[in-house]
Image: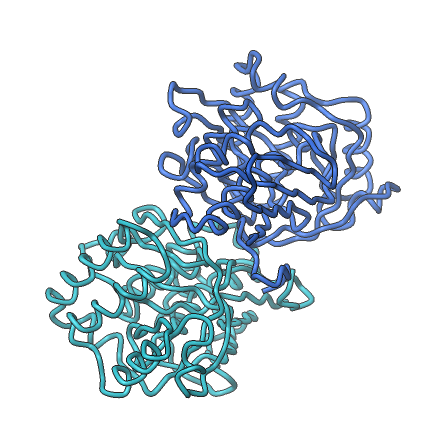
Chain colours: A blue, B cyan
Amino acid sequence: MTATAFVPGHVTAFFSVHRTGDPETTGSRGAGLALSDGVRTTVEPSARTTVHLNGREVDMPPVERVLDALEATASVRIETPLPIGSGFGVSGGATLGAALAADATFDGGHSDNELIHAAHVAEVESDTGLGDVVAQARGGIPIRLEPGGPDAGRLDGLPARPRIEYVAFGELSTESVIAGDVERLSAAGERALSTLRTGPTLPRLFAAARTFAREADLLTPRVETAIQAVGDAGGEAAMAMLGETVIALGDGLTAAGYDPAVCRVDPRGGTLLPEDGSISF
Amino acid sequence: MTATAFVPGHVTAFFSVHRTGDPETTGSRGAGLALSDGVRTTVEPSARTTVHLNGREVDMPPVERVLDALEATASVRIETPLPIGSGFGVSGGATLGAALAADATFDGGHSDNELIHAAHVAEVESDTGLGDVVAQARGGIPIRLEPGGPDAGRLDGLPARPRIEYVAFGELSTESVIAGDVERLSAAGERALSTLRTGPTLPRLFAAARTFAREADLLTPRVETAIQAVGDAGGEAAMAMLGETVIALGDGLTAAGYDPAVCRVDPRGGTLLPEDGSISF
């Protein structure tokens, strides 16, 4: 018996880091976009745990951790069109997807919050993410008002469901940024969140994200050039945290002469798929 | 300019009533299922507010209330395949859908939680619902752990996404039940929630719902007969609150000889639809 989950991708527009001694209350505040380009994870019971990403065997510590937490050993197959290590939440998506699919496969009887908690904790303990899992579990355009897992955290969102374009120029390591000195970054993230909360609209989200990337000193030349080009063409673009990646509303990158991937804001949170594996409901 | 929202239907398996002086903290605890058969609501600005349900002009006080709260006057067109007044959350779905679509139409800049709050308050003040809106905003199989709107309430859920069958025999008035003496009903609802929380699985949800309907004295002969017939055929069925309605897992009603409508548990919460109006993302 196997089970498959779909979890949307997630790009973070801005964030602040909040660490406590407890992984459930450790997390991030911020905002981002859940994407219809996501991660499909299939779990099949097996004598030992193996993880394949787009057909290649890989080490994914948070996926292995979440299976351990659920006392499952399984063959995990992850398929995604998203660039890896580029700020799309592939790690969080695979971890939450593995939790959902493992629970269904092993008839575990966990609630949504228990599975989201397990995936959040696995990401925090692996230093691979702080806020992707709760945002990906929610879907839409999540605003993380309070940090942490499903019991400690608090979420809101923007109701818009726009078309999204993206270009990934290269990788940035989440671990190297969020494990380092994040005081300045977090201060910028808190300011961005305050700005967004004074008027929760898409243009304000993108403007706050651009200010955050500059203040947190995360821009690279290619990212800065692309954001500028989209703005010059009358569009809205921002950097995705943490990757050398630019996202734009509507046809912003196309209008600026780039050749982007295209998806939408996804309204679903991470979810088991019907047994026939179809992605539509 | 118009905007359209889709909100899943919602059948309540069991509930308890919690009233305070404040509509945000007034609500219900309980559990239910969000359904892929739902409510599609289109809002178009207009000099005065009118509401059409499946093509016929109707009075829907919570829809009118939520537009008032958003300071909007509009023509509202509601389309649904769901039976009206039969426990499917058409009222909550139309109210939340009107809030989402009105915000998009009038460029209102409200967050998700603000719109869910406005819809929840409109339902509570109209005596048309206590927990549908927050459940429909979430999607899936929502468990309402704490009553109230998005700021006061707390939700969990079951991760399963089964096929659902339903038969509606007739109407029951939500208003006449939840405005009356609900002490016995609420005590039964609290016991059902405790039972579900000891092991959050679909069979336990349905068993708790059956016990609740009996203890709250809401069963009608036709509902009781159908639930019994599905059980005798090896399936899981329960009454939907508040309607003379039976829901079953998988092909439970078909196997028992009924001719049910068929849908799925819907993973989405209520959401704006893309501008081309397509329901798939």
- In front of the other: B216 or B60: B216
Q: Quadrant of the C terminus of chain B?
A: bottom right
Furthest-top residue in this view:
A181
Left or right: residue B112 compared with residue A173: left
In the image, residue A179 lies at what x, y percent? 56, 16
Q: Residue at x 55, y 38 (%)?
A: A47
Left or right: residue B214 compared with residue B168: left
In the image, residue A13 lies at what x, y percent? 61, 34
Query: Total number of numbered labels?
Result: 0
Name the quadrant containing residue A58: top right
- Residue A75 vs B226, above or below: the answer is above
- In front of the other: B165 or B169: B165
Name the quadrant containing residue A237: top right
Q: Residue at x 57, y 46 (%)?
A: A43
- In front of the other: B77 or B87: B87
Furthest-front residue in this view:
A47
Left or right: residue B270 compared with residue A204: left
In the image, residue A227 lies at what x, y percent? 76, 33
Furthest-right residue in this view:
A257
- Residue B205 vs A206, above or below: the answer is below
Name the quadrant containing residue B67: bottom left
Q: Residue at x 34, y 55 (%)?
A: B143
In the image, residue B260 lies at what x, y percent? 45, 83
